Image: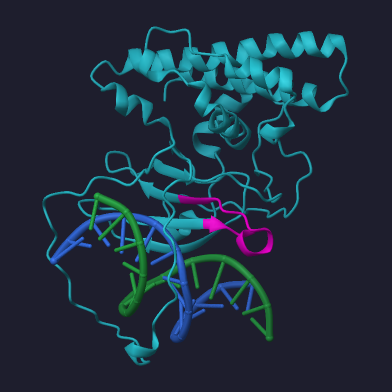
Chain colours: A cyan, B green, C blue
Amino acid sequence: MNNTLITELLLGLDYATQLKFLLQKPVDPDASAAAKELLTNVHRSFAQTLSILTSSHPAMPQDQVAQNLLISGEDASQAASIDPRSDDSTESRKRSFPLSKDRRGSYKRRKTEQTWAIVSQTTEDNHAWRKYGQKDILNSQFPRSYFRCTRKFEQGCKATKQVQRLEENPDMYNITYIGFHTCKDTLKAPQMVTCSETWDSFLENSHEDLNVPNEQKQLDPPVRSQSPIVKQESLSDETDPSDLTDAMWSELKDLELSNDKPDLKISSENTDAFMYLLSEFGHEF
DNA sequence: GCCATTTGACCTGT
DNA sequence: ACAGGTCAAATGGC
């Protein structure tokens, strides 16, 4: 990612952060006007970012560009390939207990949950995840890992995510989120960018010092040194899209990207996911 | 001992 | 039938 892009994203993040704090204050006319302006800036910044993405990747098809920030209400499962891998019946370790005893209960595979995918340098976000599975994917050299929210059983949170390294760039992760968090469990990112930190100082350090996910050790052999992840079970200042005032919300729904790439606009039907992304990944860039 | 991860089995959608 | 998603016993780390 080039510096212009990062700068633009950081700018957008800055606006979003200011907006977040503004919305936490009691309503007053001045704050409302400022929020409006900040919202415009956030919109402009993300539009500019996408514009840069599309212009700097002329060979990249639109849908591929969109995959960097893909929001979808449909099933995100990938199409099956024609080339079937030879079935490996080499089961070196067999279960010690009888197979007939191992009848698992039936379960419903979610199909209608809203999904969206991002490509990120880190798998870390401000939520606690628990890995529940890993699969080798056809024609992919990297396995796909499956995570669920740690609060799934405590609070019935349905959020899950799938993480897979990119074939073309193993340092990057393709992360597919399925369903929104309904729990109140967030983690404080170790290197959260705050308003007090200048973008310049962040830019100088960001490329090597981005927080290393605690899941990384589960995916593939680690390539970087681990930094400690401090789990914080409750964080009171989580930005919940539902916290937005109705006026702001309806205004947000009217927003469309102003560039000339209609395929990339974030439609009102995806605003929920868009705002969710803002709240989830604002600290990441 | 508790909790998270690993991993083969099982289940579902196509 | 197959690929991918989920389950849950085994395992390991603290």
For the residue pair A234 and A272, the one nearer the viewer reads as: A272
Q: Tell me if A275 is positioned left or right of A256 in this view.
A: right
Using the rendered view, name the quadrant where residue A255 is placed. top right
* Looking at the image, residue C2 lies above or below residue A42: below
Residue A63, percent across and down? 31, 26
For the residue pair A144 and A29, the one nearer the viewer reads as: A29
Residue pictured at 47% horizontal, 19% vertical? A5
Q: Is A186 covered by the magenta stretch? A: no
Q: Tell me if B12 is positioned left or right of A24 in this view.
A: left
For the residue pair A66 and A155, the one nearer the viewer reads as: A155
Using the rendered view, name the quadrant where residue A91 is placed. bottom left
Q: Is residue A200 visible?
A: no
Q: Tell me if A97 is positioned left or right of A88 in this view.
A: right
Using the rendered view, name the quadrant where residue A169 is placed. top left
Q: Is residue A152 visible?
A: yes
* Looking at the image, residue A151 lies above or below residue A171: below
Residue pictured at 61% horizontal, 27% vertical? A202
Residue pictured at 39% horizontal, 84% vertical? A102
Q: Quadrant of the N terminus of chain A?
A: top left
Q: Tell me if A139 is positioned left or right of A25 in this view.
A: left
* Looking at the image, residue A267 lies above or below residue A169: above
Q: Quadrant of the C terminus of chain A?
A: top right
For the residue pair A58 and A264, the one nearer the viewer reads as: A264
Q: Residues in magenta?
A: A148-161
Q: Is A159 covered by the magenta stretch? A: yes
